[in-house]
Amino acid sequence: MRHSPVIPSGGTVPLAGGTTPGRVPLVAVAHGSRDPRAAATVAALLHQVPLDVRVAYLDHCAPTLGQALTGLREAVVLPLLLTEAYHSRVDLPAALNEVRAREPRLRVRYGHTLGPHPLLLTALERRLGEAGVPAGDPDTAVVLASAGSSDARANAVIARMARAWRRSGWWTVTPAYASAASPTPAEAVASLLRAGAPRVVVAPYLLAPGFFADKVRTDALAAGATAVSDVLGAAPELVDVVLERYEAAQRVPVPVAG
């Protein structure tokens, strides 16, 4: 039986057909947002995943992880998060341990976050292309804009991604953070323009629309960015990453603290 991800309005978005009988159900856990576009985007992504999928949210939306796991005997729990930080290291394991304390017979395999992954750079280039920015343009500097985290390790991942992406031929690629760290996307845009970049574009390393995506776009354009691409959303590369993480979790699940 297929399940449908719940969106804040109380409606559902049907998931795609073509599931493989006997596969372990996937419970995909997103951050959650008060902005209904976020849940709709998560639904659009999971619609393309050919598995028995349930969605859960850490905050702002229903269902919770416990509600999504109700009635299952086993599941792969996968964080729909782009970097390993507090949510994947603390919040999600805590919620999972709470469920397992109530349901000791439930067998759960916990997977890695979506990022970092080389396919996510491909997806970022796809979104820039849709915004009219040729991949690897040597006259274009790119700001890789993430949500930012109080966890320095998560921010360091974004910096490493930016360094790796520079090898694609861009004028340069620099990391930026919408919160909790610096530079902000607007600061990064202004700095690159002062450094002589012929043009600066911004690639949001964000899964779904919402507060951060809107702020990145508004502030970056005001600072002089030529273009700001769309969020990653339901890019086909993300579907491939979800499936890869699902398979890997069954072979070598991530240990859950506690």
Image (cartoon, rainbow, N blue to C red):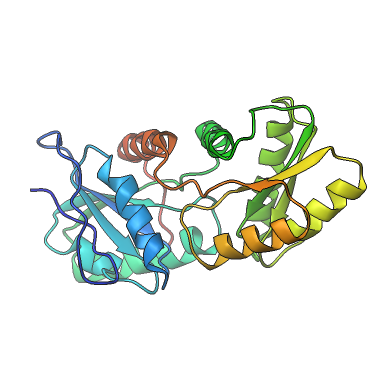
Which residue occupies 80% across, 59% down?
187
Is residue 32 or residue 188 the one in the foreground?
Answer: 188
Residue 60 screen position, x and y as percent: 38, 74
Q: Which residue is at a point 14% across and 56% down the rendered structure image?
A: 72
| Side (left or right) of 107 relative to 60 | left
Identified at 72% across, 54% down, the residue is 176
Count of number-bearing discs? 0
Residue 122 screen position, x and y as percent: 54, 31
| Residue 155, quarter of picture | bottom right
In-front residue for pair 85/200: 200
Q: Is residue 148 among what the camera can see? A: no
In the rendered structure, the answer to whether residue 69 lies left or right of residue 193 reads left
Q: Is residue 207 left or right of residue 15?
A: right
Q: Where, by quadrant of the figure, is residue 70 drawn?
A: bottom left
Q: Is residue 205 visible?
A: yes
**Where is residue 232 drawn, in percent x and y?**
49, 46
- Of residue 26 and residue 253, the one placed in the foreground of this image is 26
On the image, the x and y values in percent for residue 42 come to 35, 54
Q: Residue at x 44, y 60 (%)?
A: 257
